[in-house]
Amino acid sequence: MRVQDIDHIDLTVDDLEQAMRFYHEVLDLPILFEGKTSMIFQLGKQKLVCKTLADNSLHAMNPTVGSTTFSILAKDSLATIEKHLANYFIDIVAGPVESDLTKKKMTSLFINDPAGNLIEIREYHK
C-alpha cells in the first residue's frame, strides 16, 4: 500500500460556532463547508473537519471533545503570531520552545482551541 498524503483530520468539538470563530477568524482558515453538525476548513493542502457528537457521519470508536493534538507550519514569524494571538486573547500554553527532533531546528508555540485540542504552531529555522 502506498500512501500519498493526509486528506483531512477530524476534530470533535462541543460548540461549532466557537470552532468556526477560532479556526476561521483567529487562524484565518477558509471555510469549505458549513453544516449544522460539522464544518470543513482548508488547512494548507489538507482539510480540517470540526464535528460535534451529534454528527451522524462515521466517528472514531470513542470520540472525545478536545482529545486531538496536531501541528501546523507558520508562514509568519512566531513573534508576529504571538502578537496576533494576544489580540484575540488566546493563551499560549507553552513556548516558544526550541527543538531539533527532525534534524531541523525549529521553534514552536502551543495553544488550545476552544474545545481543548492542542495545536502546535511550528516555525523551521533556515
Image (tube, grey):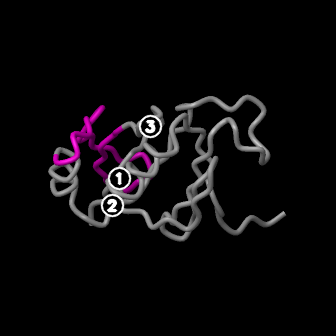
Residue pictured at 26% horizontal, 40% vertical:
90
**Residue designated by label 1:** 122
Separation of residues labelled 2 and 3 (CA atoms): 16 Å
Q: Nearer the viewer, residue 4 or 80?
A: 80
**Residue designated by label 3:** 118
Q: Please check the rendered image and state whether residue 108 is part of the magenta-colored stretch, yes or no.
A: yes
Mark identifier at residue 74: 2
Q: How many marks?
A: 3
Q: Which secondary structure lies at badge 3?
A: strand
Q: Quadrant of residue 51?
A: top right
Residue 14 in the image: state x and y as whole percent: 55, 34
Mark identifier at residue 28: none
Q: Nearer the viewer, residue 107 or 52?
A: 52
Residue 71 in the image: state x and y as whole percent: 45, 49
Q: Nearer the viewer, residue 56 or 74?
A: 56
Residue pictured at 34% horizontal, 39% vertical:
111
Q: Which secondary structure lies at badge 1?
A: strand
In the rendered structure, which segment of residues is drawn in magenta?
87-111
Which amino acid does the dot numbered 3 rest on?
Answer: Leu
Q: Please check the rendered image and state whether residue 6 is part of the magenta-colored stretch, yes or no.
A: no
Q: Which secondary structure lies at badge 2?
A: loop
Compared to residue 36, the image places residue 54 above or below, namely: above
Q: Are marks 2 and 1 in contact (CB under 8 Å)?
A: yes
Separation of residues labelled 2 and 1 (CA atoms): 6 Å
Compared to residue 114, the image places residue 57 above or below, namely: below
Residue 13 in the image: state x and y as whole percent: 55, 38
